Image: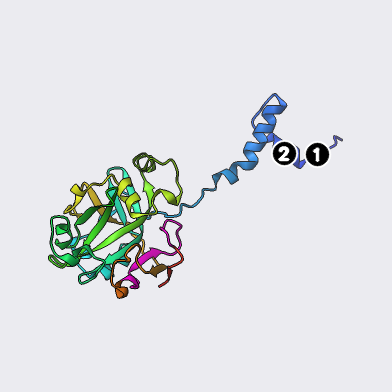
Amino acid sequence: MKTPVRHSKRADQESELPKVTTPLALRAAREKKHCSKARAVRVRPENPLTRTTAEMKLMPPEFFQIDALDLAPRLLGKFLRRDNVVLRITEVEAYRPNDSACHGRSGVTPRTAPIFGPGGHAYVYLCYGLHMMLNIVADKDGVGAAVLIRSCSPVTGLETIQERRGQKTNKPVLLNGPGKVGQALGLSTEWSHHPLYSPGGLEVLDGGEDVEKVLVGPRVGIDYALPEHVNALWRFAIADTPWISAPKNTLRPL
C-alpha cells in the first residue's frame, strides 16, 4: 500500500507561482502574489468627481443673477474650466452694492464697468500691478456686485497649472490665493465681460456634488472699508479641504 503524499501549505502556495528557476526570481514571484491585493488599493482623491469633465454641465445665467451674498456659498464646489485646466472652487468672498469694499462703490469707470454687467460674466482686474483677480459678476444688470474667487484645488491639467505658476508642487500653496488662481488659469483683464455660462473659453461647471460643511469669516485685505463691512462674515470656504488661503484662524463653521 502506497503512503499518501502530504502537501504542505507552503508547497501548495509555491505550486501556484509561475515556474521560475532561480531563487531571486522565485522570491520576486512570491512578493508579487502576496502584494497584489495591497497594490490594487487606490487612494481616494480629495475631490472625487461624480462625472467626467466632458459630462459636467454649464451653470445657466439665472444661477448667477442673485445677490452676491447668496451666490458666494453656492459657488463652493463648482468648477472652473479653461482649456485642459479644471479647478474646483474652495474659497470665495462676496462683494455687494453699497459695500465700501466693493469696486462698484465709486460707480461705473472703465475699470469697474464689467462688475455692473449682468450676473454670470467675468470681472478680472489687476491687483498691485502683479496679480490677475477673477471675480464672477452677481445679480442683475446694473447692480454692481461680484464674488471673488480666493482659492481652488486642481482637478485636471496639473502640469499646465504648474507651468503657468512657475511652481512644481501639488500642495495647496499652488492655488491658495486669488492671484494664484488667475495665474493658473492664464487670465488677463481681457477676460472681463466674458460669459461664464457659454461653452468655450472660461466656464463655470456643475460637478454634481453639494458642499455640506462651510466655513465663514471676514474678508481679507479690506482695512480701508467701513467697520461694518470689514467685520461682515462674507468670506466662505469649504470646511474639509486644505486648499484655502490665509488667514485660516478667522474662519468658523457656518
| Residue 78 x, y percent position in the rendering | 32, 58
N-term-proximal mark, 2 vs 1: 1
On the image, numbered disc 2 is attached to which residue?
12
- Residue 244 painted magenta: yes
Where on the picture, by quarter, is residue 121?
bottom left
- Say which residue label 1 marks: 6
What's the distance in space between the residues labelled 2 and 1, CA to CA?
10 Å
Mark in the foreground, 2 or 1: 2
Q: Toward which corner of the image does residue 217 lie, by quadrant?
A: bottom left
Under circle 1, the secondary element is loop
**What's the residue type where badge 1 is placed?**
Arg
Overall secondary structure of the magenta stretch? loop
Magenta region, residue range: 230-247
Q: Amino acid at mark 2?
A: Asp
Q: Is residue 124 visible?
A: yes
Instruction: Say if 124 sits above or below 36 in the image.
Output: below
Q: Report crowding for label 2: few under 14, some 14 to 19, many 20 or more residues within 10 A (C-alpha).
A: few
Q: Quadrant of the C terminus?
A: bottom left
Count neighbours of disc 1 (C-alpha within 10 A) and say few if under 14, some if 14 to 19, many if 20 or more. Answer: few
